[in-house]
């Protein structure tokens, strides 16, 4: 089935967070920022200031301006805790990680030798993202092995990924 003689192979989902910079919940984000109230007020005003795109003004009720100089740090603040969630769910066993999350801004991969753990991580992260105002984009999320093609959900997934 997976070309390994029945042995389960390491799998990796490559989730894409749908419109991360556009949908971050402002109240959730601001609740995670601990700073003097005057700075938090300025940040809130900046988040609500709106965006001018090709001469058209749009209000901003959620999200951070994509391309804004502070937006990557705000995405990191909003997504802080996702890695700890997986570490807490799957602590090391026999000094080996059961699951590892590698994240940069709104991109991340989950690495585990267990397909079952990968699927559980995908579900847990999907639930964790809801109060942030975010969701995993299913059509851009895949589970693959790093060395060999695998059959998953009725289709062949090629090995490897770009991150």
Image (tube, rainbow, N blue to C red):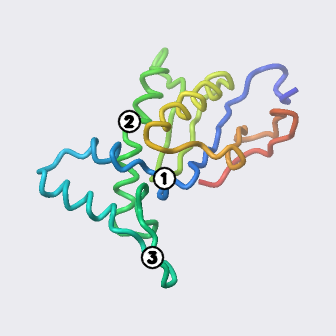
Q: Which of marks 1 and 3 is nearer the N terminus?
A: 1
Q: Are marks 1 and 3 in contact (CB under 8 Å)?
A: no
Give percent across and percent down for residue 112: 60, 29
10 Å neighbourhood of mark 1: few (<14), some, or many (≥20)?
some
Side of 150 relative to 82 (left or right): right
Q: Nearer the viewer, mark 2 or mark 1?
A: 1
Quadrant in the picture for residue 143: top right
Looking at the image, is 106 positioned above or below residue 10? below
Mark 2 or mark 3: name the one nearer the start of the chain: 3
Q: Mark 3 points at which residue?
A: 57
Q: Report, in whole angstroms, how far the alpha carbon at label 2 lies from the one at label 1.
A: 18 Å
Callout count: 3
Q: Residue 52: x, y in percent?
A: 44, 77
Most extreme residue toward the top is 94
Per the model, the C-alpha gap separating discs 1 and 3 is 17 Å
Residue position for label 1:
23
Vertical order, 46 against 20 (above or below): below
Q: Which mark is residue 102?
A: none
Q: In the image, is 155 to the left or to the right of 136? A: right
- Side (left or right) of 63 relative to 117: left
Between circles 1 and 3, the one closer to the viewer is: 3
> Residue, x 38% and y 46% (percent of image)?
78
Residue 18 on image: x %, y %: 58, 51
User: Residue at left 79%, top 39%?
Assistant: 148
Point out which mark residue 81 bears.
Answer: 2
Instruction: Give SS at disc 3.
Output: strand
Q: How many residues crowd mark 2 within 10 Å: few (<14), some (14–19), many (20+)? A: few
Q: Is mark 2 on a helix, strand or loop?
A: loop
Q: Is disc 1 placed on a helix, strand or loop?
A: helix
């Amino acid at each position: 089935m997976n070309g390994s003689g029945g042995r389960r192979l390491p799998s990796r989902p490559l989730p894409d967070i749908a419109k991360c910079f556009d949908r971050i919940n402002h109240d959730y984000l601001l609740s995670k920022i601990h700073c003097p109230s005057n700075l938090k007020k300025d940040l809130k005003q900046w988040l609500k200031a709106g965006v001018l795109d090709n001469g058209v003004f749009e209000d901003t009720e959620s999200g951070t301006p994509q391309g804004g100089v502070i937006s990557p740090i705000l995405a990191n603040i909003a997504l802080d805790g996702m890695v700890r969630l997986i570490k807490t769910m799957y602590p090391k066993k026999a000094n080996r990680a059961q699951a590892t999350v590698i994240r940069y801004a709104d991109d991340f991969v989950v690495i585990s030798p267990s397909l079952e753990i990968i699927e559980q991580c995908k579900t847990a992260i999907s639930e964790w993202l809801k109060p942030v105002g975010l969701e995993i984009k299913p059509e851009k999320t895949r589970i693959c092995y790093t060395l060999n093609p695998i059959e998953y959900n009725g289709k062949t997934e090629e090995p490897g990924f770009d991150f």
